[in-house]
Image: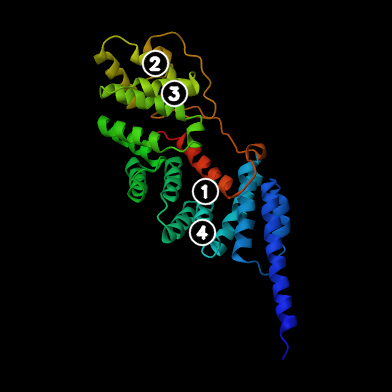
Amino acid sequence: MDLSGATGMADMSQGTDEQTLKQARKLIGQKDFDGAIDLLSPLDDPTADELFTLAESYFLKATSTEDKRKSKGAYRKAIQLYPKCYAECSDPKRACREWAWSAYCLEDEDELERAKKAGLAISDDAQLVVIHYFLKRDHDAPPEEREVVIDEALRIDPTEPNALPTKAGFLICDGQWKRAYELKAKAINHFSDLQRTHPAFPDLLARTALLAMIQGDDWEPYLEWAKDQNCRAPWVIVAEKIVGMGSKKERVAKAKELLSGEAEIEGGFDEWLGTKAIETEMGDVEQENGATGKPVRKAKKHTSDSIEAMGPKMRENLIVGLLAKGLGRVAE
């Protein structure tokens, strides 16, 4: 029997599938997420990579829209698709991260735990655990429950830069100042260039400067770096005022009072410090440790203009950026 015709048809079908996938990824690169969805949705028997690309199209659409209803609808579509394709697609780790983040945005802890379990069965990925922590935090889970999750992330990756400063917050609450300082400094050393561009980074540097001062270590490099990044960030302003106060004993006491969250600052930093009013814009960053009494945070969505050409590296950076965004909201 002559099978050449059948073989040719199979090759042509495979070529068509590859062209469809290539075109869909091209549309994603052009930020035309709806175009990619329209192209992939009608497929009768999609491959794992086609399903993954479709799921990712919904995921990226969700992160780039300001309409909360549409965003949640896209996330729901995504979490229906990731379980069907993550294990056999070309990038299972990224698929599970996006699956977990989608569940986080929908505040669905059961779904997030499924994504986390699936991802950890494939590889040790501390970022999945960090995403789980963010949801625990947002749901006001007891501190001991949240700390267990952060410890899990650090067992997987002791250098995870999102988990390190969070663990430091727990250590501060226990009065373990030296260990907290070590973890904050370690986190800064392991932050990516992308994470260092996040609006919360200068405040992290300023808090690390205060911890360094408490330990009698060189605090100036951290504070100078913070000032170079954003001299008007709230913690940068208050750290600079603290290090310029009276005696070393007074400076250390003020720093500990602020970092531990014991300070009563209902009237703001200025009243607590007894100084002139501090004028600053919080932007999209939330204070840590309840330092203002009432954290101020203005939600910031990834707009389509902020997502550059969506190659594999950019998609990876988007996840890192989302995690950095979550880190900016830590309030231990």
Could you tell me which secondary element the residue under label 3 belongs to? helix
Assess disc 2: are there few (<14), some (14-19) or many (≥20) residues with their C-alpha within 10 Å of its C-alpha: some
Label 3, label 2: how many angstroms apart (C-alpha)? 10 Å
In the displayed structure image, the side of residue 240 where residue 297 appears, left or right: right
Of callouts 3 and 1, which one flags the residue occurring earlier in the amino acid sequence?
1
Task: Name the residue beneath numbered marker 2.
Answer: 240
Amino acid type at mark 4? Pro
Task: Name the residue beneath numbered marker 3.
Answer: 226
Q: Is residue 262 visible?
A: no
Q: Residue at x 71, y 61 (%)?
A: 20
Amino acid type at mark 3? Ala
Nearer the camera: disc 3 or disc 1? 3
Q: In which quadrant is the C terminus drawn?
A: top left
The colour scheme of the drawn protein is rainbow
Of callouts 4 and 3, which one flags the residue occurring earlier in the amino acid sequence?
4
Q: Residue at x 46, y 60 (%)?
A: 118
Whether residue 177 is situated above or below residue 56 in the rendered picture: above
Task: Name the residue beneath numbered marker 1.
Answer: 101
Amino acid type at mark 1? Trp
